[in-house]
Amino acid sequence: MLQFRKPSYADKALFPSYSKHLAYEYFFSYAALWGDAIGITLCKNDTALYLHLEEDDCFLLPITDDLPKAMAELEAHCKESGQRFQLECVPSDQAQILQTMGYTIEHVRNLDDYLYESQKLISLSGRKLQAKRNHVSQFERKYTYSIRPLCSKELRDECYKMASTTWLENKDCTTKEIQDELGALKRAFDNWDALGFVGMLVCVDHHLTAFTVGEIIDDELAIVHFEKGDTSYIGIYSVINQLFVSQYLSDVHYVNRQEDAGVEGLRKAKLSYKPDLMVEKYRVTKQ
């Protein structure tokens, strides 16, 4: 039977350091940020790295070079332990392979990641992104602003304070969802160097107005983990999105802005940027 345990920062080397799957759940930062909130545990043996999510009682796709062997091991583990055999967030290419192996797959649209070409997020060119260019222009005309890297603990503390006060007052989420996200943000700030994150803030008249936190995986992929702004400033999200990519992610092909979780407003916002690629994710079971 597989032996699962909580991940630690010593486990970072077990995870991919390249963008094989493009889906953000398969990188160490996902386990580091959200492990406590959703109960992520892992098991590493000679076959694969296995990940289990306690909150949803499911596994992720085993990270392995021998998928048939890893799936057989996982099935045997579930049979012996009594755990439910169900995989979530399986990228489409691997899901199709599993289907040929006799597994049942189901597309879960709410979990699909949105990927955008970095150069498109910088230029905002074309008729379809005219509204975004207008937002940026409005902001630049209306406000005197500056940008700073999130390179000090003091600045990160200030950003956390903004997120837990101004942001909380305007967030339409459950208390648990808010606390989970604040916990993940605190872990990001407290373990900044170990995680290798990059970040930026925007100030209007020296007042903190927005911040963002991201991670460069390789030349192919970067992930935006957090993006928070004061919406009383017109165009703030369009501005911080464009500035962050232009300042830090311009050499990366794709920027992964994660899923919309089925939230209507979030889906509308992500679609408005016209994604260049959707990382479709599947639920995998066996009848």
Image: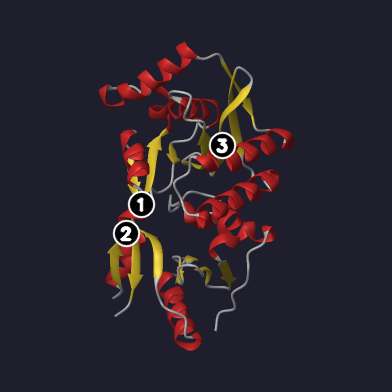
Front one among 38 and 7? 38
Of the numbered discs 3 and 1, the one sitting upstream in the chain is 1
Q: Which amino acid does the dot numbered 1 rest on? A: Asp
How many residues crowd around disc 3 within 10 Å: few (fewer than 14), some, or many (20 or more)?
few
C-beta proximity under 8 Å, tags 1 and 2: yes
Q: Which amino acid does the dot numbered 2 rest on? A: Val
- Specify whether 31 is left or right of 279: right
Question: Which disc number belongs to residue 112?
Answer: 1
In the rendered image, the vertical position of residue 24 relative to residue 197, given as above or below: below
Q: Quick check: can you spot residue 218? A: no
Q: Quick check: can you spot residue 281? A: yes
Q: How is the image coloured?
A: secondary structure
Give the percent coordinates (x, y) of residue 214. 55, 40
Name the element at disc 1: loop
How many residues crowd around disc 1 within 10 Å: few (fewer than 14), some, or many (20 or more)?
many
Give the percent coordinates (x, y) of residue 175. 52, 54
**Residue at the spot x=59%, y=29% of the render?**
201
Give the percent coordinates (x, y) of residue 54. 51, 70
Question: Which disc number belongs to residue 166?
Answer: 3
Find disc 2 in the rendering and name its residue: 108
Q: Nearer the viewer, mark 3 or mark 2?
A: 3
